[in-house]
Image (spheres, helix red, strand yellow):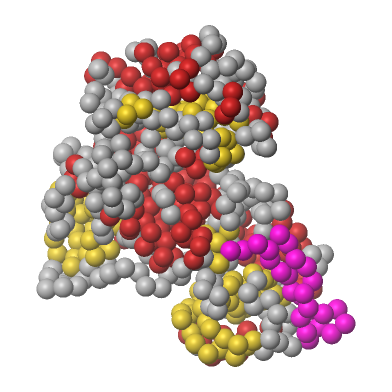
Amino acid sequence: MQFHHHGYVSGDPRIEPAAGVGVDRPADLPGEVDVLIVGTGPAGMLAAAQLSQFPNVTTRIVERRDGRLVIGQADGIQARSVETFQAFGFAQEITAEAYRITEMCFWRPDPEDPSRIVRAGRALDDPAGISEFPHLIVNQARVLDYFARFMANSPARMAPDYGLEFVGLEVDDDAEYPVTVTLRHTAGPLEGTERTVKAKYVVGADGARSKVRDSIGCTLDGDQANHAWGVMDVLATTDFPDIRTKCAIQSSNGGSILLIPREGGHLFRMYVDLGVVPDDDNGAVRKTTIDQIIAKANGILAPYTLDVRNVAWHSVYEVGHRLTDRFDDVRPEDLGARSPRVFITGDACHTHSAKAGQGMNVSMQDGFNIGWKLGHVLDGRSPEALLSTYSAERQVVAKNLIDFDKEWSSLMAKKPEEFENPSDLEDFYVRTAEFPAGFMTEYTRSLLVAEGTHQDLAAGFTLGKRFKSAPVLRVSDTNPVQLGHQARADGRWRIYVFADAAPAGTDSALTALADWLDTAPESPLAATPAGLDRDAWFDVKVIYQQDHTGIDINAVPAVFKPQVGPFQLRDLAKVYGTDPAADIFEARGISRSGAVVVVRPDQYVANVLPLTDTAELAQFFTPLLPARQVLH
C-alpha cells in the first residue's frame, strides 16, 4: 500500500481523499445519475465498488431492503474471488475470518454393511497449485460488508441507498439521460410512494426474479427444476468425525449430503437431498419443514447422529439451470445499431444449483467486468463501443458455468449403485478443479483481447485468461512480493514489461520501448490528460531478468519511475527483479528476449507482444482510447 505522496497521513491509509462527486456527496438519491445499480448483491456491490474509484462518475446503488444483508445464502469463495478481493484490499482480512477448505472427504455406503456410511476417499482442494490463494467459506453478508467499506473509503464516497425497490424503466436513446427509472420507497416516512431517477446507464443486479431483466424483455430459459434440496446452517453436536471438513456423503437409501463447514469453528451447512420432485408436486416440496430436513440428514448419516441445537437459517430449493440470451437491452436485430443502456448481472442472467459454489463467484466477475467498462466510458477514457463487449464476454462464461453445474449436481443426486465406478464423484471433483476455482474463464478475440500471434513470448500468460501471479523482488526495498498482488482495482490498465537480458541502463530493446512509451505521441500513455499523474490511466511496471542486487535503480528508465502526487515524488515501486528461488521468466514461460504483457483492469490478459513491436501496441489501444485529436 502506498500513501503519504499527497502529504503525511496519520489515520487509516485505506481511506482515500474524497474527490469529484465524493466531495459533499448528497445524502439523498439525486434525480440524475450516470449509473444506477439496482440491488446490493455480490455483482451489484462489486460493480459499485469498482465505480467508486471513478470520482467524476455519479454512481448510486439502490436496495429494496432497509439495511445491510444480515444472513446471506451464498458462502463459497473460490480462489479467483480471493484474487479479486486482493485487488480491493481485503483478501487477508476475509481469509483470517473465513473457513479454509484444504481437502474434501468422500463418504459412501460400507460395502460390507450398506446401511452404514464409511469414508472412502480424500482429495486435496488444490493439488496442482492453481492459485496461491485459498478456497474459503464465509457468509455472503461479510463479503458485501467489505465491498461497502471499500466504497465508503474510495474517492467517490459511495454508500447504498436502502429502502428503494425497482418498479420499471423506459429508455429514450435521444435523451441526455436516456433511462428513466421508477422506484418505490419500501421503508421510512415515504414508504409506498414512488419517484423517478434519470440515468445514463442502469445495471440490474436484482436477483433471479429480476424486474430489470423483465423490463428489457429478457427471460430465463433452460431446464425446469426436477430435484429438491433442503439447506440448513446449524449448530449441532454430532459424532460424525468429519463435521469440520467439506464432505460429499452418499447413503444407500437415504440420498446425499454436501457438508460445508462454516466460518467461526462451530457453524456448518448441509445440503440435504430431498429427492426427485414429481411433476404434480405444485410446490409442496418447498413446505418441507426444518425438522424433516434434520430427520432426513440423520438417515443419511447413519450410524452417526446429528443433534441440532440451533438453526441460523434454512431453506428448500429446486435445482434448475437457466440462462438469458443476452445480458443487456440490445435486441439481436439492433446489434451494431445502438449502444446498450441497461445491463443485467448475476442471478438476473444465470441460475443454477448452489452446490458447486459458483453463483456468488461468477456474479462478482460479472460486476467487475461491467464496472470498469462503465467507468472508462463515462470518464472519457474509452468510446461507448466498449460496453457492447460485456454481454458478449459474460454470456459465454455463464453458459460454461451452467454446463459444469449440470454435471456436478447430477452426480451429487445419483445413487451409489448408479455410478459405474464408486470413485466417479471424487474423480470428477479432482479432474475439474480449475473450473470451480474460477480459472477456466478465457475471453476470446475481441476489441479487448488480441490475437495470439505472439503468445509464445509469454506462454504462461494465456490471452483472455486471468493474469496468473508469480513471485518477484521489488528492487527499491528488496521485498519479495507477488507481482499480481501489486495491482489494485483502480480502473487502470497494466502494462508489464519483461526485460531482455541487458542490464538496466544499457542500450537495448527495453530502453527503446521505454523511450517510446514515455515520449511518442502514439504511446497509450500519451492519452493521459494533462494535469493527471503520468500513471493515472496506465500502470507500467518493469521486471528484469537479474535479481535486485544486479539492478541500478538510477539507471532504470524514467517511465518506470513516474512522478506522482502534488509533490511529484518518484514512485520506485514499479521496478522488479527476479526472485532467485522462483524465476518468473521460467515459471511463466517468458522469452529471454523479453515481452510486453498487457492486462485489463479486471485482471485478464489482453495482449502479448515483443518489446520491439510498438506499432502493434499502439494499434491495440487506438480503439480503446479517446480520439487522438483531443489528446494533449
Q: Is residue 102 magenta?
A: yes
Q: Is residue 343 left or right of residue 453?
A: left
Q: Can the viewer see residue 623?
A: no
Q: Can the viewer see residue 267?
A: yes
Quadrant of image for the C terminus: top left
Q: Position of residue 574 (x, y in %)?
A: 45, 30
Q: Quadrant of residue 196?
A: bottom left
Count of numbered marks: 0
Which segment did they paint magenta? Answer: 100-124
Question: What's the residue at 71%, 53% (across, down)?
Answer: 127
Q: Position of residue 299 (x, y in %)?
A: 67, 87
Task: Tell me if residue 604 comes above or below residue 303 in the rendering.
Answer: above
Question: What's the residue at 51%, 49% (across, down)?
Answer: 83
Query: Which residue is farthest top?
Result: 507
Magenta-drawn stretch, dominant element (helix, strand or loop): strand
Quadrant of image for the N terminus: top left
Q: Nearer the viewer, residue 335 or 308?
A: 308
Q: Quadrant of residue 125?
A: bottom right
Task: Tell me if residue 286 comes above or below residue 175 in the rendering.
Answer: below
Question: What's the residue at 44%, 46% (across, down)?
Answer: 87
Question: What's the residue at 32%, 29% (across, down)?
Answer: 569
Q: Is residue 79 left or right of residue 25?
A: right
Task: Tell me if residue 333 comes above or below residue 147 in the rendering.
Answer: above
Q: Position of residue 458 (x, y in %)?
A: 61, 27
Query: Which residue is farthest right?
Result: 112
Q: Position of residue 230 (x, y in %)?
A: 54, 79
Q: Is residue 449 magenta?
A: no
Q: Nearer the viewer, residue 567 or 592?
A: 567
Q: Quadrant of residue 490?
A: top left
Task: Tell me if residue 177 comes above or below residue 66 in the rendering.
Answer: above
